[in-house]
Amino acid sequence: MSEVLLCPSLGKRVQLLKKFIKIAAHCKAHRNLNSSFAIIMGLNTAAVSRLNQTWEKVPEKFKKLFSELELLTDPSMNHKAYRDAFKKMKPPKILFMPLLLKDITFIHEGNKTFHDNLVNFEKLHMIADTVRLIRHCQTDQTGNELSPCDSAEVRSSVHYLHIIDNQQTLFELSHRLEPRV
């Protein structure tokens, strides 16, 4: 959102949207659903999606690709599209963390830890299955656990990003770029 809304040039904003759509598709292709979701949701915020002049100039093939990516973020039926796509992907893969946290919260909040002073092992099994899912995502095709890689180049580029998380500021930037008609 910040990158797009801080870009004063219409042509450069169009290029940024195309680039972010490509990056989101690339992330999905490389099974990084967390980053893909972040980009899609960022481009779907009201402050960015209202930029009609900018979106009109985005080529149709990028709009179509974006629409396909958006289907993955559809929350209907408890994120069925995402869950189905995720199941089909081979590890290693990066899941969408907020949804995982939601699942763990519902397991915890929706199930008693004790029944008649006895431990609810079913609840503990559900939590354990979720932890196993995370571990499974961190394995290679043969089932060996992968070690995290650390890229100084990625860290430095992320360090210099200018991120605005104030929705009012984002809307003000959006309206400055393309005022209401």
Image (cartoon, rainbow, N blue to C red):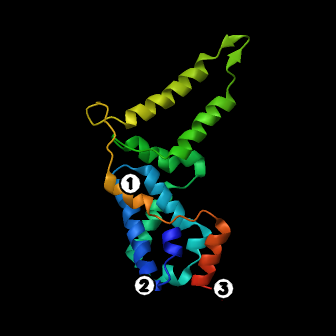
Q: Which residue is mark 3?
A: 180
Q: Is residue 150 placed above or below 111 in the rendered structure?
A: below
Foreground: disc 3 or disc 1: 1
The residue under the point 58% across, 34% down is: 104
- Left or right: 22 in relation to 45: left
Q: Looking at the picture, how far across and down is residue 73, in whole percent?
A: 52, 55
Q: Is residue 135 placed above or below 25 in the rendered structure?
A: above
Give amino acid for label 2: Gly
The residue under the point 71% across, 15% down is: 115
The residue under the point 45% across, 67% down is: 66
Q: Looking at the picture, how far across and down is residue 64, in whole percent?
A: 42, 70
Give amino acid for label 1: Arg
Crowd rating for badge 1 (residues with CA inside 10 Å; few <14, some 14–19, many 20+): few
Disc 3 and disc 2 in contact, CB within 8 angstroms: no
Determine which of the numbered discs, if any, sits on residue 11 in the image.
2
The Cα–Cα distance between marks 3 and 1, rounded to whole angstroms, is 38 Å
Q: Which residue is mark 1?
A: 155
Give the mark nearest the N terminus, 2 or 1.
Answer: 2
Q: Looking at the picture, how far across and down is residue 74, in whole percent?
A: 55, 55
